[in-house]
Image (spheres, grey):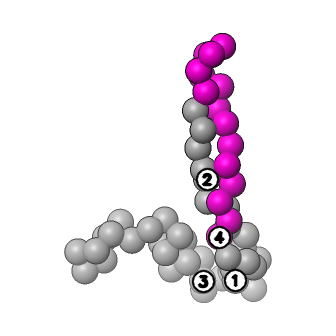
Amino acid sequence: MRENGEALTTHQSLQRLLSSDFEEVQPPMDVPFVIRETARKYQHTVAQLTVWRKK
């Protein structure tokens, strides 16, 4: 998503879409996780977790 030619992060987009009905409970957290692709190959990734509460 872009605004005025600048790329928006997923978190910024979520804030804009949810802020009217939800409040963000805590700042975003990075959550590491591992996906096993084969018996010897793994993919290490970091997801961003956000927690929201309905107003």
Residue shown at 67% from the left, 36% from the top: 34
Closer to us: 34 or 23: 34
Which residue in the structure is indicated by mark 3?
A: 19
Residues at circles 1 and 3 in contact by the CB criterion of under 8 Å: yes
Vertical order, 53 against 47 (above or below) = below
Vertical order, 34 against 38 (above or below) = below
Residue numbers of the magenta segment: 28-42
Vertical order, 35 against 9 (above or below) = above
Closer to us: 3 or 34: 34
Q: In the rendered structure, which amino acid carries the disc numbered 1? A: Glu
Of labels 1 and 2, earlier in sequence is 1
Which residue in the structure is indicated by mark 4?
A: 28
Query: Is there any visible trace of residue 17 in the rendered image?
Result: no
Q: Which mark is residue 23?
A: 1
Residue shown at 25% from the left, 80% from the top: 4
Closer to the camera: disc 4 or disc 3? 4
Which residue in the structure is indicated by mark 2?
A: 47
Circle 1: element type: strand
Of labels 4 and 2, earlier in sequence is 4
Q: In the rendered structure, which amino acid carries the disc numbered 2? A: Ala
Residue 29 covered by magenta stretch = yes
